[in-house]
Structures are given as structure tokens and as C-alpha cells.
Image (cartoon, rainbow, N blue to C red):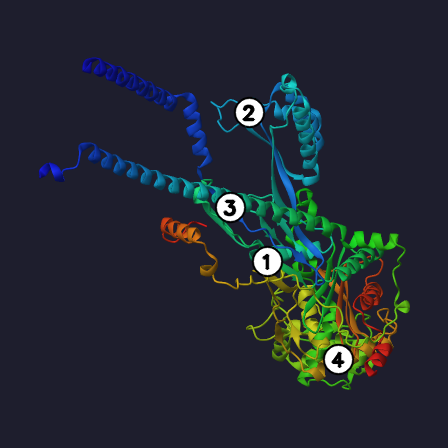
């Protein structure tokens, strides 16, 4: 009877082997996920650094371009250009004034930057567009995030 | 059979242990090698934590129409890293750097040939060459570097080593202040001392609005570790839009320089203000400087006392002050336009005898006659009628003796002499009435007189129209300081002054435009009393009389061609006004009234 219910040793060893193999595969999977997240975080971090550096460079380049433009349009240069184009300074007697309906005179400029257009929210909620894989992976990533999220 | 099998297992196990040992020893060797140490140091540097100071980019300054008056431009700090200089690189380094920096070759060679000894100074490998190299000059380095790289790429492998390199040149970009208009409006703008360790605005708008312009400074701990990237978003400093009109400013500077040269004056000031709101449209002062060249400016040129004479110098204004005395007299009811003063050529006030400028008596005179003939005796009499306490109250309300609080750094005032802080001393009453014994700066005067040109309302003179902070443009409301006189008084005195100019055929009259104004010729106090051979010549005027849109103040210091304000300052007012009405689009009175009726 005992013999009838007892498994053969090779079967037990095979089961143990499979169990160990599963553990190894699971550990490898965890390692793979960890590595993947780490790589992504590092890549994103480097990308952010690069973008930050690009932004600094762009701000500087814009300032330089504005300075060049301001120099080209300085009072002295504009007067030189006007004279070169054949314009002459007008005297009081030559000025003609006329009524222009609706014209309220020269207005002071607005130099405030135009406000950014708000981004339109997508029509469909993510829950209707997400694949199973994305949903699963997003869940894993969320679980891996430290409280308060990554910075930034 | 079993024993043979066991032996084979032993051999295999032994071999595996040996391989494992070799791998282990190899790993230990790698970990402790020089290369590993260098790698670790490199990684440490790569991911090191460092402190960094991030400053907002300084805000720009614009004129009232959006023309930039002060902004930022890119320059580079250029240096060399001695660790990367090989002998073959020196000729090309010398050539390129001397071209980029404008230095002679010997100077460059001396700098780049310094010896670097890490034991003496581990960080001595960097040699600073220049802090403010324009980007177009650095383009020379970039171009040459590109050319050498192309040569290196094209060269066969065996010849690559012989191609020189500019790798040792280090250039770091940064922004510095630039003033596109050079010296235009320099006395208003002030300077930004960017070459200092702690850059700061100095005088003018740059100092007064330094906090707004400079934004914020953030000291932060940063790391290059990509897992801990932090981005500090430092907003730029606020941009300022001034009330200054670039064209008006350029015009009055030109007129002033010509006037100073023509009259032999030592210096001068012209201020144009909109009396309706206190906006300064232009403020020219002698001794303007090229702000882009501040490193080479003399201390004297940027001394606060000389930088903007309209606010940093006080002077006894003389007869232009009479408009305030007469306005006070009319407003208080002490005199009326048709009140008659019997002028004998002298009047005793507080024990001091007051004489007219021509030392003669002009007989009975109405208040208009008093202003037209600029009678010191009459105005001292008016002050007597007002009484010392009331006269002090009026001067105080006109802002005399107090700062105008113009939004420019460096305003200097001289307090009004008073008794018990509430009345003019009897001895000063007579002289104060015609602008002697009282010191003012031009900003105080334009503010006080603006009340006469604006129905009695006196706005604080200011140069800031609006500013852009955090993406929002904010326009502060002009500040109404006081209403020292009634609207009726303001209109009455304006009319009296306009008629005075017309009756005397003043050199200040402008064809087609009715203007009101008053000349001033003031004695200058010296160490032993008033100087006998020098005067301050002034003129204050506004127009058009029926709807004043501008107020012009002219001050010429010690003119030599003539001491009289009516001779030297009045024509300057006329010249400014003739050009001003075109720039401000003000049609002649007749046309304006015709256009208004259409």
C-alpha cells in the first residue's frame, strides 16, 4: 500500500527541479523588470538634463538674437536707414493732420508673452484605449514609484 | 567502474573550482587596478553633488513704444586647459586665440605656455584668458575647430596624430547687459555692474528697479546623477516699459548738447513731462555716458552727482519759481489777477531789501505785469500778502523741500528753511518768493509746475509705465500726490503766463501753438555770497494752453554768451516744443480745434 501511494524518487526530483527553475525564472523576470525600469529612469533623467541644457541654450540664443535685432533697430541705425532710403526730416509747416474716424492714436505695446493654448483633453478616456499590456505595465510602474513620484 | 566515474567527477569538479578561482582572482585584480580606481573616480565626478547658483536672466527695459533700451547679449568666458596642450597644437592655438581675443601672439603664447604642476595646484590646469568675448569672436574658434576636425577625419590613420587640435580651448557662454542705444537715455537707465562678483544695478532705473529686474537667485544642490535629476525653473526678471519716448529723448539730447555748446554753459538739463499723469517723456542731462563701455568710464563720469543732474543736483531756480508764488497768492485769495502793486523798485521783507533785476521801479502793475516784467519786488509783496505760514503750506503742498520720489535712484534734495517746521522765516520770505534762498532739483520743479498745467492736480513724476512679471503685464496707476491749487487758479495762472509771453514777444513763443511759461535767471551761491559773474538760466513752459499735453523744463548752468534765461533758455524751449509737437502728433491750435469740431 505504501509503495502504491509513494511517488518515485525521479518524479520528486523533477518536481523540485521544476520548482527551482520556476523560482529562477521568476527571479530573472524580476531582475529584467528592475533593469528595464532602471534603464528607462536613467534614459529619462539624461533626456531631462539634455532638454534643460537645450532650453538654457535657446534662452541665451533668443536673448542674443533680440540684442542683435535691437541694435539693428536702434534710433541711430533707423535714422541712417531712413536717410539712405531718401526720407527727410519733416518740418512743422509740412505736417498735414487729418481726422481718422476710429483711430485713437498710437498705443503702448504689450510685451507680455502670449498665454499658451490649453491642451485639449482627449475625447476617449485612457481606459478605452489602453491595451492589457499597457494597463499591466502601468500598474507595475506605479507600484515601483517612490511616494511622491520621481523628480521630476 | 564506479571508482573511475568518481575520479572523472573529481577532475571536472577540480577544473571548475580552478576556473572559478581564476575568475575570482581576475575580478579582484580588476577591482584593485589603477584603471578601476580611475573609473571609480570618474564615476564619482560624473555623479558628484555640487552646489550651483542660478540667477534669473535680467529683465529688459523698453521705451514706451517697445523699443529696447537695455537687454542682454551673449558673451563667452574663454580660457585654456593646459592638460590638453601638445607642442604641435601651440602654433594653431596662438593664431586662433590671438584672432579671437584681439591679442598679440606673444601675449597668447605666454599665457598658454604656463607650467601646470598638479602637486602645487591641482586645479591650476585652467588658465582664464578673457571674460567677455563676443559670440562673433568665439565663432572664429568654432570655425577653426570644425576645419581641423574635418582635416583629421580626412587624414589617413597614420597621419591623424600629427593634426593639431584646439581641444584645449574652453569657452563658456553667459549673458551680459547691453544697451542698444549706447548713450541715449543713459542718465535715466543707470548701469548694471555685471563684471562684479555680485552684479547689481547702479543709479537710474537699473538701481531703482533692481529687485524687479534681477528676479530671483536660487542656491541649489545639484547632481549629474540621471536618477536624481532636478530642474530648477528660475523665472526671468521682470521686463520694464518706461514712459520715455525714444524719439523725444534723442531729440532733447541733441537740442541740449547744441544749446550747451552754443551758450557756453558748463552743463544743462531738459525734461519733458506729460502733466496729465506725471509721465516723463524725456530727461536729458549733460555728461551722458556710453553704457556699453562702463569698464572704461571715469569715476567722475559715473559719480552720482554728475550722472543725472535733473535729480542729483539742487539749485536756486530763480524766477521760474515765481509761478508757484503767484499760484499760491491767487489760490489763497491774497491777490487777484487785477490786483495792483505799486512798484518803487524796492520792497523790504523781514528786514531784507528786495530789488528788481533791473534795479528800477515800474510803477503800478497788475499781477500779469508783475509776471511779465518778472518783478522780484512784486512777488515778494505777494508772499507777504500770503503770510509766512500759509506760504509754507503752499510750498509744502507743491512738494518743495521734499523728495519728488521720482522712480530713479540718486535723487538729492535740499530742505526748505522753516521756523518751527511750519512757516517760512521772515528773512527768507522775500527771496523765496522769487526762487532765491530755496534749492530744488528739476524733478521737484516739474512736479510742482505740472499742477499749474493740469487743473491743479499734481502727479508724481515717474518713468515706469508698466512691467511684465511672471507673464503678466502690470500697469500701475499714476500717483496723484496732491491738489495744491484749484483748477480755476491753475487756468488763471496759465492764462496770465501765456499772455505775458505774448506781450513781451518772448523767444519761447511757438508759431501755431499757444504756450504758457516763465523764464528764470538765478544767482549762484558761492563761498562768500552770490557769484557776480555766473547765473543759472532756466525756462519752464507748457502747452497747448487750452489742453496742456507737455511741460518742458530747461536749465542751463553758467551760460557765458548771456546770463539771462530769456536770452539763452527761452529759445531752447521753443526749439524743443517745435519738434515735440510733431513727435507727439499735436496739430497747431487752429487745426486741432477745427478737427475737434468735425
Mark closer to the observer (3, 4): 3
Mark earlier in primary sequence (2, 1): 2
Compare residues B529 and A13 and report the one nearer the observer: A13
| Helix, strand or loop under label 4 | helix
Choose between B51 and B43: the one closer to the eye: B43
Q: Earlier in the sequence, mark 4 or mark 1?
A: 1
In terms of secondary structure, where does tag 3 sit?
helix
**Residue beneath label 2, please?**
B83
Q: Residue at x 45, y 33 (%)?
A: B45
Would you name the residue on which mark 1 appears?
B238
Foreground mark, 2 or 1?
A: 2
Which residue corresponds to mark 4?
B493
Q: Quadrant of the N terminus of chain B?
A: top left
Q: Select label 3 or label 1 by which is in front.
A: 3
A36 versus B159 height, above or below = below
| C-alpha separation, residue under disc 2 versus residue under disc 4 | 79 Å
User: From mark 3 to mark 4, how far is it between C-alphas?
Assistant: 68 Å
- Asked whether disc 3 touches disc 1, contact meaning CB atoms under 8 Å apart, the reply is no
Check disc 2 and report its element: helix, strand or loop.
helix
Disc 4/disc 1 C-alpha distance (Å): 42 Å
| Residue B142: quarter of image | top right
Provide residue A46's location: percent of width, then percent of height: 50, 42
Q: Chain of mark 4?
A: B
Are the residues flagged by discs 2 and 4 in contact, CB closer than 8 Å? no
Local SS, label 1: loop
- Residue designated by label 3: A48
Chain letter of disc 3 in the image: A
Amino acid at each position: 500500500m505504501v509503495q502504491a501511494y509513494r511517488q518515485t524518487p525521479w518524479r520528486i526530483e523533477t518536481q523540485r527541479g521544476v520548482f527551482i527553475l520556476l523560482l529562477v525564472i521568476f527571479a530573472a523576470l524580476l531582475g529584467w523588470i528592475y533593469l528595464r525600469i532602471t534603464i528607462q529612469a536613467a534614459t529619462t533623467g539624461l533626456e531631462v538634463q539634455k532638454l534643460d541644457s537645450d532650453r538654457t541654450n535657446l534662452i541665451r540664443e533668443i536673448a542674443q538674437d533680440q540684442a542683435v535685432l535691437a541694435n539693428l533697430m536702434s534710433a541711430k541705425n533707423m535714422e541712417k536707414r531712413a536717410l539712405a532710403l531718401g526720407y527727410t526730416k519733416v518740418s512743422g509747416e509740412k505736417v498735414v493732420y487729418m481726422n481718422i474716424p476710429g483711430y485713437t492714436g498710437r498705443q503702448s505695446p504689450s510685451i507680455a508673452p502670449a498665454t499658451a493654448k490649453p491642451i485639449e483633453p482627449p475625447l476617449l478616456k485612457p481606459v478605452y484605449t489602453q491595451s492589457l499590456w499597457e494597463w499591466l505595465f502601468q500598474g507595475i510602474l506605479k507600484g515601483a514609484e517612490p511616494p511622491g513620484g520621481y523628480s521630476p | 567502474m564506479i571508482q573511475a566515474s568518481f575520479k572523472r567527477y573529481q577532475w571536472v569538479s577540480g577544473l571548475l573550482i580552478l576556473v572559478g578561482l581564476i575568475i575570482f582572482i581576475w575580478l579582484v585584480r580588476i577591482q584593485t587596478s589603477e584603471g578601476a580606481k580611475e573609473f571609480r573616480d570618474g564615476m564619482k565626478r560624473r555623479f558628484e553633488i555640487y552646489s550651483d547658483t542660478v540667477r534669473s536672466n535680467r529683465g529688459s527695459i523698453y521705451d514706451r513704444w517697445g523699443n529696447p533700451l537695455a537687454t542682454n547679449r551673449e558673451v563667452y568666458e574663454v580660457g585654456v586647459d593646459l592638460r590638453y596642450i601638445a607642442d604641435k597644437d601651440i602654433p594653431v592655438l596662438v593664431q586662433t586665440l590671438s584672432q579671437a581675443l584681439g591679442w598679440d601672439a606673444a601675449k597668447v603664447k605666454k599665457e598658454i605656455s604656463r607650467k601646470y604642476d598638479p602637486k602645487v595646484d591641482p586645479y591650476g590646469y585652467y588658465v582664464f584668458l578673457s571674460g567677455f568675448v563676443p559670440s562673433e569672436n568665439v565663432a572664429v574658434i568654432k570655425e577653426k575647430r570644425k576645419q581641423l576636425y574635418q582635416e583629421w577625419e580626412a587624414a589617413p590613420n597614420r597621419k591623424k596624430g600629427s593634426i593639431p587640435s584646439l581641444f584645449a580651448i574652453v569657452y563658456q557662454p553667459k549673458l551680459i547687459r547691453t544697451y542698444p542705444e549706447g548713450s541715449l537715455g543713459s542718465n535715466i537707465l543707470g548701469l548694471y555692474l555685471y563684471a562684479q562678483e555680485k552684479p547689481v544695478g547702479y543709479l537710474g532705473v537699473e538701481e531703482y528697479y533692481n529687485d524687479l529686474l534681477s528676479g530671483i537667485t536660487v542656491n541649489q544642490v545639484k547632481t549629474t546623477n540621471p536618477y536624481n535629476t532636478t530642474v530648477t525653473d528660475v523665472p526671468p526678471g521682470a521686463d520694464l516699459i518706461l514712459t520715455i519716448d525714444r524719439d523725444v529723448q534723442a531729440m532733447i539730447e541733441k537740442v541740449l548738447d547744441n544749446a550747451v555748446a552754443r551758450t557756453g554753459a558748463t552743463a544743462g538739463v531738459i525734461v519733458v513731462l506729460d502733466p496729465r499723469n506725471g509721465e516723463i517723456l524725456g530727461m536729458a542731462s549733460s555728461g551722458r555716458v556710453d553704457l556699453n563701455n562702463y569698464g572704461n568710464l571715469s569715476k567722475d563720469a559715473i559719480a552720482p552727482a554728475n550722472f543725472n543732474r535733473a535729480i542729483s543736483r539742487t539749485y536756486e531756480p530763480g524766477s521760474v519759481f515765481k509761478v508757484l508764488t503767484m499760484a499760491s497768492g491767487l489760490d489763497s485769495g491774497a491777490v487777484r489777477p487785477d490786483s495792483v502793486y505799486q512798484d518803487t523798485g524796492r520792497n523790504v521783507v523781514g528786514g531784507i531789501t528786495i530789488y528788481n533785476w533791473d534795479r528800477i521801479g515800474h510803477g503800478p502793475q497788475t499781477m500779469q505785469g508783475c509776471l511779465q516784467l518778472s518783478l522780484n519786488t512784486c512777488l515778494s509783496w505777494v508772499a507777504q500778502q500770503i503770510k509766512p505760514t500759509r506760504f509754507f503750506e503752499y510750498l509744502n503742498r507743491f512738494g518743495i523741500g521734499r523728495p519728488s520720489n521720482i522712480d530713479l535712484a540718486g535723487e538729492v534734495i535740499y530742505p526748505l528753511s522753516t521756523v518751527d517746521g511750519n512757516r517760512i522765516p521772515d528773512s527768507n520770505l522775500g527771496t523765496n518768493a522769487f526762487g532765491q534762498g530755496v534749492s530744488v532739483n528739476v524733478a521737484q520743479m516739474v512736479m510742482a509746475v505740472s499742477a499749474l498745467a493740469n487743473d491743479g492736480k499734481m502727479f508724481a513724476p515717474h518713468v515706469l509705465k508698466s512691467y511684465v512679471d511672471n507673464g503678466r503685464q502690470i500697469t500701475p496707476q499714476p500717483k496723484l500726490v496732491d491738489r495744491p491749487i484749484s483748477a480755476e487758479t491753475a487756468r488763471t495762472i496759465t492764462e496770465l503766463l501765456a499772455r505775458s509771453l505774448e506781450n513781451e514777444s518772448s523767444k519761447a513763443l511757438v508759431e501755431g501753438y499757444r504756450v504758457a511759461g516763465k523764464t528764470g535767471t538765478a544767482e549762484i551761491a558761492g563761498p562768500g555770497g552770490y557769484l557776480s559773474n555766473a547765473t543759472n538760466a532756466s525756462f519752464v513752459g507748457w502747452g497747448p494752453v487750452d489742453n496742456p499735453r507737455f511741460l518742458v523744463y530747461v536749465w542751463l548752468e553758467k551760460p557765458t554768451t548771456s546770463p539771462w534765461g530769456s536770452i539763452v533758455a527761452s529759445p531752447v524751449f521753443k526749439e524743443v516744443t517745435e519738434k515735440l509737437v510733431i513727435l507727439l502728433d499735436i496739430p497747431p491750435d487752429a487745426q486741432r480745434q477745427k478737427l475737434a469740431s468735425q
